[in-house]
Image (spheres, rainbow, N blue to C red):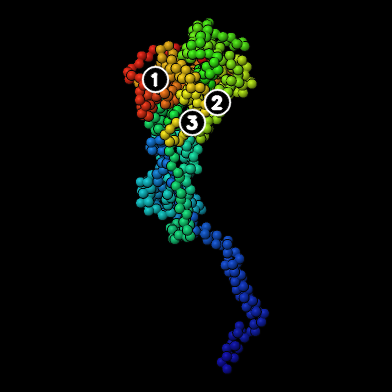
Amino acid sequence: MSRSVLYASSPLLASRTPVWRSKLIVAAIATGFVVLAGRAAWVQVFGNAFFQKQGEVRFLRTLELPANRGRILDRNGLLLASSVPAPSIWAVPEDVERDPAKLARLAKLLDLSPAELDRKLQDEDKTFVWLKRQIDEPVAQQVAALGLSGVYQRKEYKRQYPEGEAAAHVVGFTNVEDLGQEGVELAFNHDLAGRPGWRRVIKDRLGHTVEDVGEQVPPVDGRDLQLSIDSKVQFFAYQQLRDAVIANKAKAGSVVVLDVVSGELLALANYPSYSPAKRQNLSGAQLRNRALTDTFEPGSTMKPFVIALALEQGIVQPQTQIQTAPGRLTMGGFTISDAHPHGVLTVNEVIQKSSNVGTVKIAMQMQPRQMWEMFSQVGFGQKPQLPFPGAVSGKLRAYKTWRPIEQATMSYGYGLSVSLFQLARAYSVFAREGDVVPVTLFKTPEGNTAGVRVLGGPTAASVRNMLHLVTMSGGTAPLAQTMGYSVGGKTGTAYKQEGKGYASKKYRGVFVGLAPVEKPRIVVAVMIDEPSNGKYFGGDVAAPVFSATVQQTLRMLGVQPDMSVKPQVVVEAVEESF
């Protein structure tokens, strides 16, 4: 009875509800459940891979485990390059604590201005930004002590180069990613770099590692390389070269020291140089490994090869007399001259006094093909088999294209081009009884390395005697004399090419020689580019560097002096023809 009264007093309850409305509501609810069930099925089954990937992007990380780059050692095991820990600082901008005092301290520690740091952190959409790569360990510890949320560290390594600019062109350097960019670092990057490892982890939103996922792949450290370079010889040669370039107000210079017994490269230095660890504002002139990448016309240093060929073929003997008067020779409208008229010279004296006329008269008794073969066999026009970036082959044209005047000028070093390294290796033919040594950059077992036979032993010995006369009184390089050791070598002074001709007052002074004379152990080649302090002959600017380098190197190698150790009389050098 009460129920009917309630219905009667409530119009809302008394009205009849359409059946379709209730069915619609039930259908809507059922449809919602179906949609949710379908979505759940899509997420859990059909589209699982996508959502799994999205989850991994947000929380699963693959951390690289960097490999330690291999060391570069000299022949005695001293470090030329090594890696040291250098943490890198990174941040998640949206998570960084905006504490002004801490941020100011962070900027100071990272050597950034507050404005620079703010620019790096202003984009909060980024989930990763480098703040500073490869900082010192003590600085990294101070950064960690700040306790600044959103700022993290990554373990990395950076290279150290104890020998600095002295060995820069040999060792080279790496970039911030620890990849070789120059020198041995570039040439043997694959061996030195090793192989990084990795591990997969789950991280929370604050970047903290929660747990490892799956297996870890440990890194494989790079392989150490032991070079043939002697860091003490390298440093001393570089020091002597640098002082000579500065004293002669020259543009640049290079020096190469070669052990002719083993074929090992003991030193290769250039000036100007650079510090591999501090490479800001570097120029191309500093980076160039000139001893291998720069070619030049070798001038009179080519004469011993021509004379050696003539001796080998029986055209002349060391005492054969050559008439060089009046000191000039005209060929094809061109005049070839000596610095001073000498009259009659023996073949020995042609080398000793560096006579262009005498050399040309001997060279023109041979066929162009014979000279070309000689030059090729000692390595001219051939790319050096040395794994250095940028090593060049120089220029030696095919003999069929030579005109008589070109054959003549090539005999005293014009019309072809070589690198200083090629020149040093070529002179090993005189130091090794007629064979050319293959050069190596790596330390080799003790013993004599087999070479390629080019000349007979007696011919090589005869030329060594001529080279010895060059350094004695009456020769062009008495300043090459070395206290305690007999030396022999040849000067070269050549005009520099400029455009299609030659500069009238720009020269390269060269000296290349060997020591001791009777049983040579080393060949040293020196080039001074554009000396401009009054002296420019190879015997004046390059020979003193040779002298000091030979003495120091032979002592370090334990070679016994073959001459009485007393000051030698050095007279004024005879001017060479060029």
**Residue 552 x, y percent position in the rendering:** 37, 26
In front of the other: 543 or 35: 543
3D distance between C-alphas at marks 1 and 3: 25 Å
As helix, strand or loop, the secondary structure at mark 3 comes to loop
Counting from the top left corner in percent of width and height, residue 223 is at 45, 44
Q: Which label sits in the foreground, 3 or 2?
A: 3
Q: Residue at x 52, y 9 (%)?
A: 322
Could you classify mark 1 by the number of other residues whose Cα lies within 10 Å: few (under 14), some (14-19), or many (20 or more)? many
Badge number at residue 486 = 1
Quadrant assignment for the N terminus: bottom right
Q: Marks 1 and 2, Cα distance to the nearest angstrom?
A: 27 Å
Q: Are marks 1 and 3 in contact (CB under 8 Å)?
A: no
Q: Amino acid at mark 3?
A: Ala
- Nearer the observer, 14 or 203: 203
Nearer the N terminus, badge 1 or badge 2?
2
Instruction: Please state which amino acid type lies under the numbered disc 2.
Output: Gln
| Residue indicated by mark 2 | 377
Q: What amino acid is found at the position of numbered circle 1 in the picture?
A: Ser
Q: Is residue 561 visible in the rendered structure shown here?
A: yes
